[in-house]
Structure formats: C-alpha cells, structure tokens
Amino acid sequence: MDIRAHNRLAWDRQVERGNQWTIPVSSAAIAAARDGQWQICLTPLKPVPRSWLRTYWSSSDPAGRDVLCLASGGGQQGPILAAVGARVTVLDNSPRQLAQDRLVAEREGLALATVEGDMADLSTFADQSFDLIVHPVSNSFVPDVRPVWREAFRVLRPDGALLSGFTNPMTYLFDETLARRTGVLQVVHALPYADPVSLSEDEKARYAREGAPFEFSHTLEDQIGGQIDAGFVIAGLYEDRYGPEEKYPLNPFTAIFIATRAIKARK
C-alpha cells in the first residue's frame, strides 16, 4: 500500500471539508503579525512560547531567518512567519494544503516558497539550510518518525531549533468510533498502532471513499528519544488538549498532544 499517495489524496479532501488544520489565517492575523502581534500553534490550543523561537539570535523575532514549515501546509504557520519577516519554505505532501499557503501569500503580498514532498525525505534541501523548523501535529501520518528527526537535524544549522507537535500515543489505545458515539473508553488496540494493520479491508475501503488519512501512533521513545538519538537536545516541552467543543471523551481527562523544542547544539 502506498501510504504517502493515500494520505496526499486524503489531505486534499480534508481541505475540501474544512479541517481545522487546513483553514488559512485571515488578513487581520497577517496585519497583526506585521505589527508585531502574532503567535503560531503546534497543537490545537496553546500558542508556541515566543522564547521557543530563539536560537542563536538575540530576540524571539525570526525576521531575516530561514524557516522550514515541515508538513505544515494549510496557510497557517508559514504565512504568519513570512509576515514577521522570515524567509519561509513550506513543505507538505498535499498539493491542496500548499495551495492554501500560496493563497495567503498572493492575497497578502508575502514572499513564501512551497515544496511538495515527504517529511521523511528532505533531500531537496542541502545540509544546514534552515535556522528554524516548525513541525505541527502531522507525523502521525507517516509509518516511521525517526527519519523525520534525522532529516530535520541534517537541514538545521548549528544552534537551530526544531519545534514539534505530536499526538500522545495513549489516544490510540481506544475504540474511537465507540468513544465518540457512546463516551465509553474501551481499550482495543495494542501500541504502536497503525491504521493499515489494524483496520479491516472494509474499513480501509471506507477510508479511501471518505478521504480519511491513515494514522500511526509512535512511541514516546521514537517521538522524544528519536529526537535525542538524531542529535538534538530537548530544551522545552508542554502538553495540550483539543478545544472544549471536541467530543472525544479522553479530552477531559488528559492531555492529548505534546510539543517539544529541540536544539541542534554547536559542537
């Protein structure tokens, strides 16, 4: 099964459906960013601390720096950072997601590059191309997360920062359909979880018809330990939840998302 091709088409469909991660930022948000009032998110609710955007420069303002928005299409983080003055490249697997970034760039007169590609293969970029990588919740759509960390480390400059959001793997333990329908949290899956392995053939066919992306849980050993093994130093971590309108029953009980700040330390 070609996971990347399936998920490319699925995320194109998510744009059509207005998934929250596909809705571009407003003109008002861009105007505020140009005026110094801005924030970006790696996870649904909590904004990234401005201090996380510091690397070897003296302030939290990434103006003039090379930023890679990794698997970060949708017209959200990239245009905001471009409005602040960063040199932004957005890489995403979905052409429709990248079109959202171009839409904002053209609407607002922003300089912003878009590249269609695989988050685990950044061979289109030379070593040490970027000062900052912004990687919101998206690596749950690739089977193996460790190549993502290794490639991010390679393309970052010394003292550069990787800001990542990802899903707490415990969320994949439960029968999500049952949980959403009844509120009952029933453990049915072993971890690490993978849609192509756990779903029946009928369910896979339904995913294809409905344009649902295949998801994969990754252990914390691979998510956090994988960054460390790639050479990063973890310099920050916070947890987040869905918004209160989200009906997933685990949400009231525990954080569902994790964000990390990892530094490529100078040797």
Image: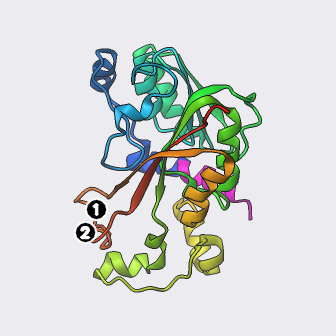
- Front residue of 177/18: it is 177
Question: Residue at coordinates 52% horizontally, 63% vertically from top-left?
Answer: 210
Question: Residue at coordinates 49% horizontally, 30% vertically from top-left?
Answer: 101
Question: Residue at coordinates 54% horizontally, 64% vertically from top-left?
Answer: 220
Q: Is residue 57 left or right of residue 205?
A: left
Q: Label 1: state its secondary structure.
A: loop
Q: Label 2: state its secondary structure.
A: loop
| Residue ID for mark 1 | 246
Which three-letter amino acid code belongs to the residue tagged 2? Pro
Q: Which is closer to the viewer, label 2 or label 1?
A: 2
Residue 201 place in picture, x, y as percent: 64, 79
Image coloring type: rainbow
- Front residue of 243/102: it is 243
Magenta segment includes 129: no
Tell me the quadrant of the picture where the C terminus can be found. Answer: top right
Structural crowding at the residue carrying mark 2, measured as other residues with C-alpha within 10 Å and reported as few (<14), some (14–19) or many (≥20): some
The single residue placed furthest to the left in the displayed view is 244
Structural crowding at the residue carrying mark 1, measured as other residues with C-alpha within 10 Å and reported as few (<14), some (14–19) or many (≥20): few
Residue 102 place in picture, x, y as percent: 51, 26
Q: CA distance from mark 2 to mark 1?
A: 10 Å
Question: Residue at coordinates 38% horizontally, 41% vertically from top-left?
Answer: 41
Q: Earlier in the sequence, mark 2 or mark 1?
A: 1
Give the residues drawn in magenta, as a range: 1-11
Residue 115 place in picture, x, y as percent: 65, 31
Magenta segment includes 2: yes
| Residue ID for mark 2 | 252
Looking at the image, is 204 positioned above or below residue 154? Answer: below
Tell me the quadrant of the picture where the N terminus can be found. Answer: bottom right
